[in-house]
Structures are given as structure tokens and as C-alpha cells.
Image (cartoon, rainbow, N blue to C red):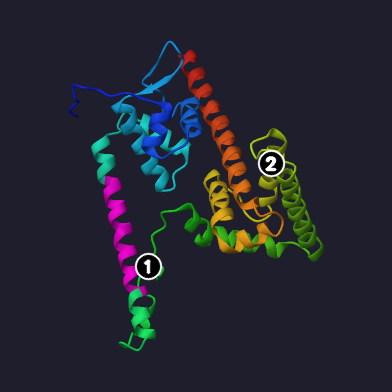
Amino acid sequence: MRAYREDKVVYTVRQLAELASVTVRTLHHYDEIGLLKPSQVGANSYRYYDEDALLRLQQILFYRELGLELIQIKDILDSPDFDYIDALAAHREALLARAERLDTLIETVDNTIRHLKGEFMMSNRKIFQGLTPEQEVDYTRRARLQYDRQIMAESGRKWKSYSAAQKQAIFDEGNAIYDDLADALEAGTPATDERVQAIFVRWHNHIHYFYEPTLEILRGLGELYRTDPGFIANFEKLHTDLPEFLHEGIEQYVDDLETAELERMLAEDEKKRDER
């Protein structure tokens, strides 16, 4: 059983957003989908969050850090078997494993620098220490997107099945999508606007030419678009602000997909309860 403090502190949505380094919009979204409800709502309609809400938000952010989708996180946290201490112990193990790998990678970088300076001789095996497939631990959406062999194999098979004409048509369609997004940005249309979101529907459909994208992968693409040097260089040719615009629009698009899926699941649960 967890001990509670006598002097419970409550936070407004803005205070909690600042405390947890998330956006107010994120907390509103979590409320809408039932992932993190406010502890109480005042007469002024302000949301207030107590320590229980803070601990739940901590769990949400831990699971997000490990690459889980919001739907998966909600299932875990709402499970009657969920235990905070067990969950924290599991997070600790995962973080220790990640820290160990990062320490190994840092050591490899340091040793390589010393090797190139002629300070000592580095074996060929040591050059790849921490980078071998056996040691690689996939914790982020970016790594999963870039290195998941199943996704890469599926993409390769699909691409090889297309004719030269089909490949050119796919290229042209993709270019048209990004041109339209750049035009929307240039026109001052917000990435969250429904007209822009309609372009992201085309973008989502276009990705199916390569592989079946999960919501996790879609979010990963949005993150890659604003962090990967190759993507940034290509998109900035269309508009200097396009990488960030794409990320913002994709976040909204995936949020909406997750909300729709959660609403569908909640409706199914409600229907099952009514039938009992």
C-alpha cells in the first residue's frame, strides 16, 4: 500500500504541463481519451490534478519513452492487475539496460578517438562494441523505424514488385503530397487545420506503398522528419519550416486516429455492458 501525504497539493493543467514538461494540449488530449482524467473539475471548469494524477502521468511518460502507443498504455494502466511499484521496477530495468548500452557506446567513441590519434591500438572487434545486432536494444520509435528488419524486408519486397512506371507514379504522388503541404505552410494554414489534415490522409495512404504503418511508426516518421539530417535537408528545399510543420501535423493526425480508436473501444465496452 502506498503512503499518502497529509498536505495534498493540486495543480492546474498549466502548472502540471510546466512541471512535467508537456504541453497543455497534450494533457487536454489525455483527458479527452480517458488516459489521464483530472482529479477534480472546479466550478470554473478548471482541471485540477493531485498526486495520484501526477504518478499516473509519470507512468504514461515512462511508457511513451519506451515507444508504446497511447492505446497500449491505457490498457496497461487500466488493468486491475497494474501495480505502480512493479511498473517502476520494470522501467528501472529497461533504463539500466539502456544506460549500460549507452556507456558502452560512449566507451567505443572514446576508444576510437584515441585509436585515430595513435594513442593505442584498437582491435577490429572493439570498433563495433555496442553496435552489434546482439547488443542492440530497440527502445525508440526512431530506431524501430530505421532498423526493424521485418519492416525493411516488407518494404523491399513491395518495392521490387512494382514496375518502373508504377515506381515513377509513386514518386510523383509523394512529391505532390509534400508540395501541397509546403504550399499550405506558405499560405499560413496551421498544420492542425482540417484541410491540411486531409493532406495527411493522402500521406498516410501513400506510405502503404512501402509497408503497413502502425500509429507508432507514423509518430516515428514525424519525429524523424524534424530530427534526421537527411529528411531535414530534403524538406527544407521546399520550405525552411517544413520539418517542424510536418511533425506538428503528424502528431495531430495520429492523436485523432488514436482518439477514434479509443472511442470505438469504449463504445464496444459500453455495448457489452448493456448486453449483460
User: What residue do we see at 48% from left, 22% from top?
Assistant: 269
Indicate the quadrant where residue 57 lies.
top left
The residue tagged with tag 2: helix, strand or loop?
A: helix
User: What residue do we see at 69% from left, 46% from top?
Assistant: 205
Q: Amino acid at mark 1?
A: Glu
User: What residue do we see at 44% from left, 38% from top?
Assistant: 22
Indicate the quadrant where residue 187 lies.
top right
| Residue 106, position as x, y percentages in the image | 34, 69
Q: Earlier in the sequence, mark 2 or mark 1?
A: 1
Q: Amino acid at mark 2?
A: Val
**Disc number lying in front (2 or 1):** 2
Seen in the image, is 188 located left or right of residue 252? right
| Residue 190, position as x, y percentages in the image | 66, 38
Q: Measure how far apart labels 2 and 1 are at the Cα level.
A: 37 Å
The residue beneath circle 2 is 201
In this rendering, is residue 141 above or below 152?
above
The residue beneath circle 1 is 134
The extreme top residue here reads: 43
Residue interval drawn in magenta: 90-109
Decide whether residue 36 is among the magenta residues: no
Indicate the quadrant where residue 99 lies.
bottom left
